[in-house]
Amino acid sequence: MIKKTLVFLVGLITAAGVSAQVYNYADTTPSGHVLYYNIANDEAEVTFKSYNYPNYGSLIDSTLIIPDSIVYDNVTYPVTAIGYKAFAYAEMQHVVIPNTVRTIGMWAFGPCQYLTEVVIPNSVTEIGQGAFGGCHNIVSVTLPDSITEIASQTFDADTSLVSIVIPDAVTTIGAGALSQCYSLRSVTFGHSVNSIANGALSHGKHLDSLIFLSDVAPWISDIFYTDTLHLVIDIPCGSYYSYYPRFGSNHTYIVPSVNLSMTVSSLAPDWGTANVILDADQQDVRCDSSAVIQAIPNYGYHFTGWSNGSLVNPDTLMIDRDSVLTAGFAKNSYTVEVNSSDPTIGSVNGGGVFDYLDTIVLIATAVSPYHFVRWSDGNTQNPRPFVVTANAYRTAIFGIDTFNVSLNVDSITHGTCTGFGNYPYGSAASVVAVPYSGYQFSHWSDGSTYNPYTFAVVDDVQLTAYFYENGAPYQDTLILHDTLWLHDTIYLPHYIHDTIYITQEGVDGVETINAKVYSSHGQIVVEGAEGNLVTLYDVTGRALATKRNDNNTLRFIVPTSGTYMIKIGTHPAHKVVVLR
């Protein structure tokens, strides 16, 4: 290791009058070579010292490794540039350029006649004129994707260079950039090259092919300066009429004609498929021919577009290069419309717009005294889980509640009854007691003496027909219920009928346990008594209906005029007379 030495100091005066310092400074590389640097603006540039010192014209063993940073006076400086003629005439065979370097200066490695291979990292954005000119033994060069220009004479007289690929970002090839490269056989120009200057390929006497990737020919001047009649120009499909005027008829033009591939696939194979329909002769897709691509969505899905932005399906494409496309699909949206057969007696919800295979719930809600019957497709579930697979229309069908009228007789030897069965809410039931020979009808168990007996059905009804023997009075069977007490007996023309009374606290309109019971418009109304079970009885003590009073007001619709009893919880019953 040699001693680090400060060789000289140069003061630079900026436009603002502020001094900046530049050092010419020697240091040893990781490969054991002494290099010189300029240090300025917190960065280091490799530079040459003189014709008699390292960097310039020295024999550098085999491989030179340029460090990515140096340390001077306890400060680390990144190596970002290789300066003008930094390695001119140096005799190393290989060089490793760190990925901190952004600039390679003019003639930086020219001519290094023993250099055989150059790999330039992607950090490099600028390569100066003649940077690798005269490197007679360079066989291959790897250029970074980051440069946009090949400067003039960059590889001039690199007589062993066989082929080179110009990166896609390069737009300009300078004059003489690849001149006198006598071994050069092939040059590939990236997609962006639009200008090739005079003599760029002059004296390339062994050039076999130029490969152009751009669909549009670049501007060229006289780039050969030599006979190139044997040169083959390989160009993209469909670009012959762009390149022919630039190069003329003295060359062989190759336009790819076979073995191009057109590959299509689906982004979601479960949602749809994609395929290529071969061109007319049913051979492989070929340059400047057309192929049809088609996307086929599965049921419940639809095509959304190709990865190249096309929304056409099927789409016809001109084939000019290997192509890979994907088809996109999405779920269909469907409308599920739900309706009520009669909005005045029932409502529905759960409809809307949904994606394919969404699971929703349809709900039908009836208004008393109606009930849900079925959906229009025959399904009777409610609530109803529903998987969306298409546009759907469902109607909820409601029906009026039906109640049972049950008829009995006091004795099967006395008579029979007709008119029992199920009746829609509010419909009229007409029941008839038919006495057997020797008997006459007396009354129904609710006190009515009508026969036939017609009444509105608003709940399940149980009636017993009572008969008496011709010429003999009939006595009711006494039914005692909770706090109902039997008091007097009234003798009627043909039978004795028991009359039931309650204590004074049960008289109409009297408030008991903060509840009020009264009749109104053919109904029995109970106000208050929240949280209690309220039971309606007929005058025989038969329970007709029981409801829980969860609201402030509870109503019982009774089938006919008469006397009824209301019992709230365990409290004494209340007599209520209803006139319809």
Image (cartoon, rainbow, N blue to C red):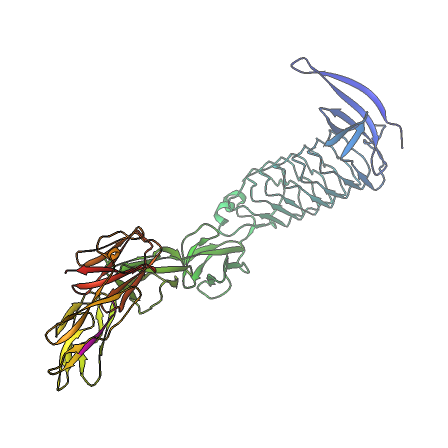
In the image shown, does 565 or 338 lie closer to the viewer? 565
Predominant SS along the magenta part: strand
Residue 491's place in the image compared with 117, above or below, is below
**Residue 382: image location, x then y, percent:** 35, 64
The residue located at (61%, 41%) in the rendering is: 224
The answer to whether residue 400 of the structure is visible from this angle is no
In the image shown, does 29 or 131 lie closer to the viewer? 29
In the image shown, does 488 or 543 lie closer to the viewer? 488
Residue 368 falls in which quadrant of the image?
bottom left
The answer to whether residue 481 of the structure is visible from this angle is yes
Residue 144's place in the image compared with 523, above or below, is above
Q: Residue furthest top?
A: 17
Q: Residue furthest front?
A: 488
In the image shown, does 100 or 395 lie closer to the viewer? 395
Q: Is residue 462 magenta?
A: yes
**Residue 434: image location, x then y, percent:** 14, 81
The residue located at (77%, 18%) in the rendering is: 10
Left or right of 490 on screen, residue 482: right
**Residue 247: image location, x then y, percent:** 54, 44
**Residue 4: image location, x then y, percent:** 86, 27
Residue 399 falls in which quadrant of the image?
bottom left
Left or right of 275 on screen, residue 526: left
Quarter of the N terminus within the rendering: top right
The residue located at (50%, 49%) in the rendering is: 240
Q: Which residues are magenta?
A: 459-466
Residue 107 falls in which quadrant of the image?
top right
Q: Is residue 263 magenta?
A: no
Number of marks = 0
Residue 439's place in the image compared with 514, above or below, is below
Residue 27's place in the image compared with 170, above or below, is above
Quarter of the C terminus within the rendering: bottom left
